Image: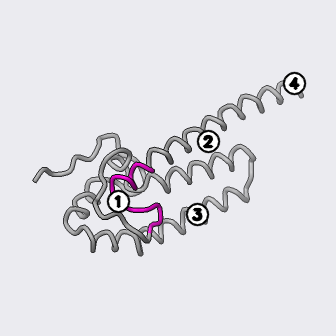
Amino acid sequence: MEESRTRFDRAFSIRFGSLRDWQLALSLVCLGFFRKGMGTPAPIDAPKKLVVNGLYRFVRNPMYLAVACLISAQSIARSSHAIFYYLLFFLFGVHLFTVLYEEPHLRRIFGAQYEDYCRQVPRWIPQLKPYRPPTT
């Protein structure tokens, strides 16, 4: 019994490591956002240009989603209710911040261009078809 538990732990540890690797990769990909948008990672310093390439073509908040995936993986790996509750708290806080501050701020800065983006790209659940901005 103990040996099978050890094999399970090793296999799960490898999978958990893979989830961390994916989260790191997603974070690095999202850093290109700041270079292209001429902004910073701080949500209060919005980019000067609307960035709609990379992962942002599939979901509006890929960085928050990557962090939520990491917290979720930690909760599963450690079988921790406390980390799961932290995940819920994080998701609630990020959702409120996004809806009450970030999106209205971006609507003021980018106007109709951002409205079109919001209509076509979901906030939290990635879509399979990438967003294609209208050509002007």
Q: Which is closer to the viewer, label 2 or label 3?
A: 2
Marks 2/1: CA distance? 28 Å
Q: How many marks?
A: 4
Q: Secondary structure at mark 3?
A: helix
Mark closer to the chain start, 1 or 3: 1
The reply to whether residue 62 is in sight is: yes
Residue 97 in the figure: left or right of residue 24? left
Mark 1 and mark 3: Cα distance apart in space: 27 Å
Which mark sits nearer the N-terminus, 2 or 4?
Answer: 4
Does residue 69 show up magenta in the picture?
no
For the residues labelled 2 and 3, the Cα–Cα distance comes to: 18 Å
Residue occupying image coordinates x 83% and y 25%: 4
Q: Amino acid at mark 4?
A: Glu
* First to last magenta residue range: 31-43
- Taking the spot 74% from the left edge, 52% from the top edge, the residue there is 80
**Along the polypeptide, which appears first: circle 2 or circle 3?**
2
Q: In this rendering, which labeled residue sits more in front, label 2 or label 4?
A: 2
* Label number found at residue 20: 2
* Disc 1 secondary structure class: loop
The residue indicated by pointer 3 is: 90
Q: Tell me if mark 3 has few (under 14), some (14-19) or many (20+) residues whose alpha carbon lies within 10 angstroms of its own.
A: some
Q: Which amino acid, mark 1?
A: Met
Name the kind of residue labelled 3 in the image.
Answer: Phe
Which residue, given by chain and number where applicable, does mark 4 sit on? 3
Sequence order check, earlier mark of 4 and 1:
4
Where is residue 6 shown, x and y percent of the image?
83, 29
Percent from the top left, x then y, of residue 85? Answer: 67, 61
Q: Secondary structure at mark 4?
A: helix
Q: Is the residue marked by circle 2 packed among few (<14), some (14-19), or many (20+) residues within 10 Å?
A: some
